[in-house]
Amino acid sequence: PPPTGACTATYKQVNSWQGGFQGELTVINSGTAAVNPWSVTWSWPSGVTLASGWNATVTQSGTTVTAAAPTWSGSLAAGASVTVGFTANGAASAPATVKLNGVAC
């Protein structure tokens, strides 16, 4: 993780429909060092399940979602951001407890 443990997370709901939604989570590495490889995690309420994700390898275990750095973009430079897109099933819910490499944003 960045030495300062600093990151900023912003969520945007792109779309919603009966039984699902699409969102984008942008995380900025506001620390002083690159994070390599980076990994973003967040939690959803019970009943919300990941359908698909992009700009990262996105997986879900229980209520925790992990977006791991793709092979083509493993490093997140200081001051840089990454936007992870996803679709999910269930009630539209903003990601909670967002973390960059285990450090809360």
Image (spheres, helix red, strand yellow):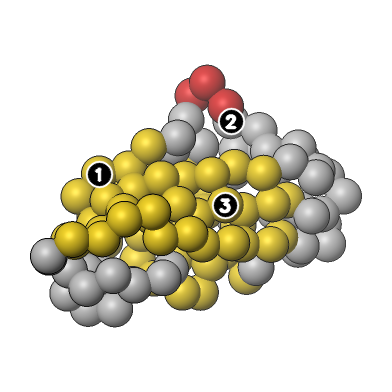
Residue behind mark 2: 74
Q: Amino acid at mark 2?
A: Gly
74 shown above or below 94: above
Residue occupying image coordinates x 73% and y 51%:
29
Check whether the beta carbons of the residues at disc 3 and disc 1 lie within 8 A of each other.
no
Q: Position of residue 24 (x, y in %)?
A: 45, 52
Discs 3/2, front: 3
Residue behind mark 3: 26
Secondary structure under badge 1?
strand
Residue behind mark 1: 52
Quarter residue 75 falls in: top right
How far apart are the alpha carbons under marks 2 and 1? Answer: 20 Å
Q: Is residue 103 visible?
A: no
Residue at the extreme bottom of the image, as rendered: 45
Q: Position of residue 21 (x, y in %)?
A: 26, 59
Secondary structure under badge 2?
loop
Secondary structure under badge 3?
strand
How far apart are the alpha carbons under marks 3 and 2? Answer: 16 Å
Residue at the extreme right of the image, as rendered: 32
In the picture, measured across the screen, residue 51 lies left or right of residue 32, that is: left
Disc 2 residue crowd, few under 14, some 14–19, many 20+, Cα 10 Å? some
Check whether the beta carbons of the residues at disc 2 and disc 1 lie within 8 A of each other.
no
- Give the mark nearest the N terminus, 3 or 2: 3
- Give the mark nearest the N terminus, 2 or 1: 1
Discs 2/1, front: 1
Residue occupying image coordinates x 12% and y 65%:
19
9 shown above or below 28: below
How far apart are the alpha carbons under marks 3 and 1? Answer: 16 Å
Q: Is residue 68 visible?
A: yes
Seen from the viewer's position, the closer of residues 70 and 21 is 21
Q: Amino acid at mark 3?
A: Thr
